[in-house]
């Protein structure tokens, strides 16, 4: 899973959100390492919707424009959890205690 996808799913893990809120939450969660352009975000949201990892749970009109609120699906939650577990396992390979003066 690519980093932007991971953070988009993570941004939705606690509650549904609309596009701008997702962009802001992704930046916050990633420590500003991941900054999504509007076009990139909506392209990713469309793809994640087609993959059934997220779904539109509410739509409202604000200033004459549709605002969709997205939420994780059960499959999206499972995918996010699996990716977090994969990354944690990969981190343990590097962060494990090392023997001092051990052979390489």
Image (cartoon, rainbow, N blue to C red):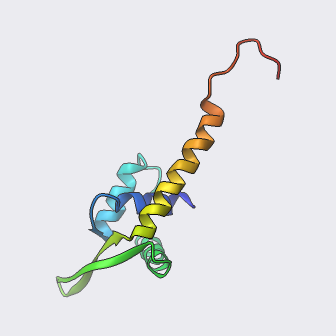
Q: Return the residue nearer the eye: 15 or 42.
A: 15
Horizontal side, residue 97 vs residue 26: left or right: right
Residue 95, placed above or below residue 61: above
Residue drawn at x 36%, y 59% is: 11
Q: Return the residue nearer the eye: 51 or 61.
A: 51
Horizontal side, residue 72 vs residue 94: left or right: left
Residue 94 lies, in percent from the top left, at 64, 33
Q: Outermost residue toward the bottom? A: 64
Q: How many marks?
A: 0
> Is there any visible trace of residue 43 in the rendered image?
yes
Residue 31, placed above or below residue 39: above
Residue drawn at x 62%, y 22% is: 97
Residue 76, placed above or below residue 88: below
Q: Quadrant of the C terminus?
A: top right
Looking at the rendering, which quadrant does residue 60 occupy? bottom left
Residue 75 lies, in percent from the top left, at 45, 69
Residue 82 lies, in percent from the top left, at 52, 56
> Is there any visible trace of residue 35 in the rendered image?
no
Looking at the rendering, which quadrant does residue 2 occupy? bottom right
Horizontal side, residue 15 vs residue 86: left or right: left
């Amino acid at each position: 899973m690519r980093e932007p996808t991971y953070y988009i799913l993570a941004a939705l893990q606690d509650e549904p959100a609309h596009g701008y809120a997702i962009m802001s939450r992704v930046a916050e969660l990633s420590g500003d390492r991941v900054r999504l352009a509007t076009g990139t975000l909506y392209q990713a949201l469309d793809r994640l919707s087609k993959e059934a990892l997220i779904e539109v749970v509410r739509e409202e009109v604000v200033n004459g424009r549709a605002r969709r609120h997205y939420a994780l699906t059960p499959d999206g939650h499972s995918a996010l959890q699996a990716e977090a577990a994969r990354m944690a396992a990969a981190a343990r390979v590097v962060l494990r205690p090392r023997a001092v003066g051990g052979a390489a």
